[in-house]
Amino acid sequence: MDTIIFDVDDTLYDQAMSFKNTCKRMFQEPFTEEELNQFYIISRKYSDALFDKCEAGQMTVREMHIRRIKDACSEMGMTISEEKALEFQEAYVEEQQKITLFEEVEELLGSLREQGKQLAVLTNGSTGHQSMKIKQLNLAKWIPEENMFISESIGYAKPAPEAFHILENKLDLDKQKTVYVGDSFANDIVGAKQAGWNAIWMNHRRRKMPENSFRPDKEVHSAKELVEVFEKDVLVERKLN
Ligand SMILES: [Mg+2]
């Protein structure tokens, strides 16, 4: 592979951690780790669905922020006021200012850069919020600023083919030698495969693969396994050379 393009949220860092920390701050309930995991998965479901509605102009970002935690709480058997939902969002943003890369991902970025690979990120979300996370993760250490693509800035969100086409043009990609790495099956895997790219599913939450859909070229269950895929890739390339 010549070009490796990464999703950001829950691919490069553990997004559940900031969510769980926010829950611990905002709710009196003493959640078990199991409940927090469940709460996180439920919250992502609403978050993704409402993000799409927001993209389609059917609701504002503020409404999305309120609804996604309200609906997740309701599925968990809790109620939350609009005011508290907004407080939750504020606390969540604060927690996201503390995120750090998965250790193995940090290693991987260093090694890929050393090998002279072209690196980029393609992430869904608002420019301000995603830029804050990119900065916090210090991604500019390995990835040039002009290779950071945020859906709000480019005008298209994954899985829309246009989002992937924009990168093809800007980065002069050879699709066959380009791989996209992401945790969301619906956005990252479907999006990348639809665009004709290679795709690695970073399925560290062990979600079930949807049937009758696209297939990732590789599925890994941890950052460690992800590193191993690229180590093997280097060995294959060395043999070929
Ligand atoms: Mg993600």
Image (spheres, helix red, strand yellow):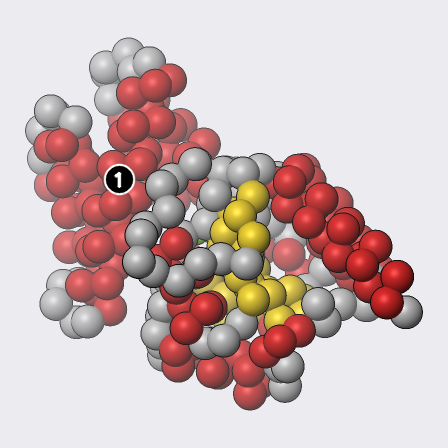
Identity of the residue drawn at 11% across and 24% down: 77
Write down the quadrant of residue 90 in the picture.
Answer: top left
**Left or right, residue 108 beside residue 152:** right
> Is residue 181 rendered to the left or right of residue 124?
right
Please report the residue visible at 64 percent of the width from the left and 81 percent of the height from the top.
Answer: 174
- Camera-side residue of 239 and 13: 239
- Vertical placement of residue 199 versus 107, above or below: below
Residue 120: x percent and y percent?
A: 61, 67
Residue 148 locus on image (x, y percent): 56, 69
Callout 1 secondary element: helix
Up/down of 38 relative to 135, above or below: above
Q: Which amino acid type is shown beneath numbered disc 1? A: Ser
Quadrant assignment for the C terminus: bottom right
Residue plotted at (29% across, 16% down): 31
Q: Quadrant of residue 121?
A: bottom right
Quarter occupied by residue 102: top right
Residue at horizontal 64 percent and vertical 46 percent from the top = 226
Which residue in the protein does label 1 denote? 43
The answer to whether one can see residue 146 in this image is no
- Looking at the picture, does residue 156 appear above or below residue 208? below
Instruction: Estimate the x, y position of residue 21 in percent, counting from the top left.
Output: 40, 27
Specify whether residue 225 is in view.
yes
Task: Determine whether, in the image, residue 28 is placed left or right of residue 128.
Answer: left
> Which residue is more in the foreground, 109 or 93?
109
Question: On the picture, is 170 further left or further right than 93?
Answer: right
The N terminus lies in quadrant: bottom right
> Mark 1 Cα within 10 Å, few/some/many (few <14, many 20+)?
many
Q: How many marks?
A: 1
